[in-house]
Image (cartoon, helix red, strand yellow):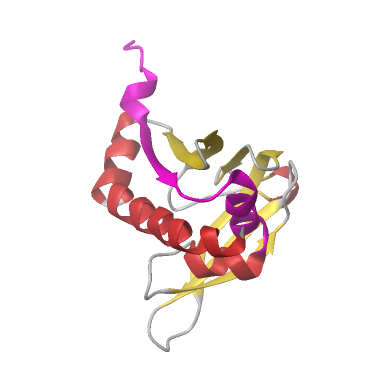
């Protein structure tokens, strides 16, 4: 049996955001703000559920052009520490119900005060190195990077 290391199955991304953690948290914790940055533009995001508590649901849909909204994310929050840390997984849906996601992952998002702003970091854990590579091939760095850039553009206006 080969022992898998975290580096084999994790993807990470981090950026400095020129806004305090309270403003970044506001962008994360209010559906109307989250919908503005959570999916790369020009794709439209609809926040269906944002129940920020352990066991709470996190459901979003997306729409391209004028088409119908389609499923994007159906997850469950594992940990919520306002202005500091969020963890969610697609392995579960609201109320700790087992899920069958198209991509199994757990994401840990941290907000660390840095100078006058926030060091925003996301660590995304996958079941296997193959799943991590699949997510990377699907555009993890471009997609997550784009949404963090969109968050960084929105958050200073909220603070």
Q: Which residue occupies the foreground of this view, 43 or 3?
A: 43
Q: Position of residue 57 (x, y in %)?
A: 69, 54
Taking the spot 40% from the left edge, 74% from the top edge, the residue there is 43
Q: Position of residue 9 (x, y in %)?
A: 36, 29
Q: Say if the magenta span includes residue 115.
A: no
Asked which quadrant contains residue 11, the reply is: top left
159 in relation to 43, above or below: above
Q: Which residue occupies the foreground of this view, 149 or 93?
A: 149
Most distant residue in the front direction = 116
Residue 131 falls left or right of residue 55: left
Q: Position of residue 92 (x, y in %)?
A: 62, 45
Most distant residue in the bottom direction = 66
Taking the spot 38% from the left edge, 85% from the top edge, the residue there is 65
Residue 5, can we see it?
A: yes
Taking the spot 47% from the left edge, 43% from the top edge, the residue there is 104
Residue 92, can we see it?
A: no
Q: Which residue occupies the foreground of this view, 59 or 1?
A: 59
Q: Which residues fall within the magenta stretch? A: 1-30
Q: Say if the magenta span includes residue 11.
A: yes
Asked which quadrant contains residue 82, the reply is: top right
């Amino acid at each position: 049996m080969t022992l898998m290391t975290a580096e084999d199955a994790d993807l990470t991304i981090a950026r400095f955001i020129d806004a305090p953690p309270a403003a970044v948290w506001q962008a994360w914790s209010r559906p109307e703000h989250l919908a503005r940055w959570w999916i790369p533009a020009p794709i439209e995001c609809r926040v269906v559920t944002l129940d920020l508590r352990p066991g709470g649901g996190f459901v979003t849909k997306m729409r391209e052009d004028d088409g119908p909204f389609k499923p994007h994310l159906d997850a469950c929050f594992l940990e919520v520490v306002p202005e500091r840390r969020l963890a969610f997984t697609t392995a579960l849906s609201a109320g700790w119900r087992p899920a069958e996601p198209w991509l199994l992952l757990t994401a840990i998002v941290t907000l660390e005060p840095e100078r006058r702003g926030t060091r925003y970091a996301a660590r995304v854990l996958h079941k296997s190195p193959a799943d991590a590579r699949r997510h990377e091939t699907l555009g993890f760095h471009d997609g997550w990077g784009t949404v963090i850039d969109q968050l960084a553009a929105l958050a200073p206006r909220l603070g």
